[in-house]
Amino acid sequence: MSLRVGIPRALWYYTYYPFWQTFFTKLGVDCVLSEATTKQTLDAGIKDAVSEACVPIKLFFGHISSLRDAWQAGKIDVLFVPRYVSWQASTVFCPKFLGLPDMIKHTWEQMPPIISPRIDLRKKPFSLLRICNNVRRGVGGKLHRFGHAYVCARIAQWRHEKRLRRNWDPNRSINKQAQVPLQAPSDQTTVRLAVLGYPYLLHDSYINLGLFDKLHSLGAEVVTAESLQHKHKKPVRHWSKPLFWTYTDMVARAGVHALGLDADDIDGVIHLTAFACGPDATVDKLLEIEARKNNAKPFLSLCLDEQTGEAGCLTRLEAFVDMLRRQKDQQAKETAAQPVRQA
Ligand code: SF4
């Protein structure tokens, strides 16, 4: 029987799972994902993680806890918890990403063997190739399969990133389900929103309280940070220094573009933040200031934690979308009235 590697459906999963899943599969290793987040996952994470951790880290602990149960039930053999330091030369991951393997190892006494490569692609050429070869050794993969597995993994990752740039939901991209374009109700003006936030908060439909479904039901079109960040290619220069955390930099660049005057196709911006996240507190304030600068483009900040109530969140979303729609209808009326006044 082939080795079974347990992978938590949290944090880096939304960005890098296609790479690792392809790599392991081509090596002949089975990937076992933790189930989608539920209340039990979150409760387990709250119980096991330190209380001051941000909610995505608590969720990560919840997913590890379920994989640990799977190991005890004989369903997986090893856990895969990489130490993500830097994937792009210019930015690094939040310190909590760096500490994940240590936090996990020191939380539970009985754990399956953990494979935790340090992923830092900043300095040496061919770093990823070397890291993958070490991972191959760790899972007992055959050397003759390595080259093919590595190339296929790079292609899978490239395709995934391409789909994200086209505004695909990462869950759909990972599961190779075609993206369904939104059909806004024909009797309402479509409102186009930039919804910014870390992928592990934005695309986990339990912790985001079904945000996308709600926005779609309100007739709003959504564009996310993964696709918008590429419209602002360089780090944000007019802030005193660029933000050097990978996901925060992505949100910042997407936010500066969406709030800017060039993005006249975007009617408003929603920033989804995680309670107890230091980088989020910084970027949220900077985006708020940015929003005030550019003709006060509507900006809504929603902070999520394990206590956030669905009803309060929905009310704020409804009010925001409603306000944007009225504003847009008003502008349309004024534009339509102009030639009449001239005549
Ligand atoms: S960036 Fe923020 S939300 Fe993400 S892991 Fe770090 S502290 Fe948590």
Image (cartoon, rainbow, N blue to C red):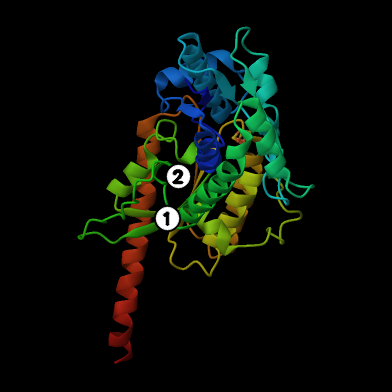
Question: Is the CB atom of the residue marked by disc 1 within 8 angstroms of ligand 1's nearest atom?
Answer: no
Q: Position of residue 262 (x, y in %)?
A: 53, 70
According to the picture, the residue beneath numbered tag 2 turns out to be 170
The residue lying toward the viewer, choosing from 125 and 212, is 125
According to the picture, the residue beneath numbered tag 1 turns out to be 193
The residue lying toward the viewer, choosing from 303 and 78, is 78
The disc, 2 or 1, on the residue closer to the chain's N-terminal end is 2
Q: Does residue 233 appear left or right of residue 324 in this picture?
A: right
Q: Could you give the CA–CA distance between mark 2 and mark 1, rounded to whole angstroms?
A: 18 Å
Q: Position of residue 69 (x, y in %)?
A: 48, 12
Element type where label 1 sits in the image: strand
> Which residue occupies the extreme front position in the image?
144
Three-letter code for the amino acid on which mark 1 is drawn: Leu
Q: Is residue 225 visible?
A: no
Element type where label 2 sits in the image: helix
Residue drawn at x 50%, y 60% is 297
> Which residue occupies the extreme right position in the image?
123
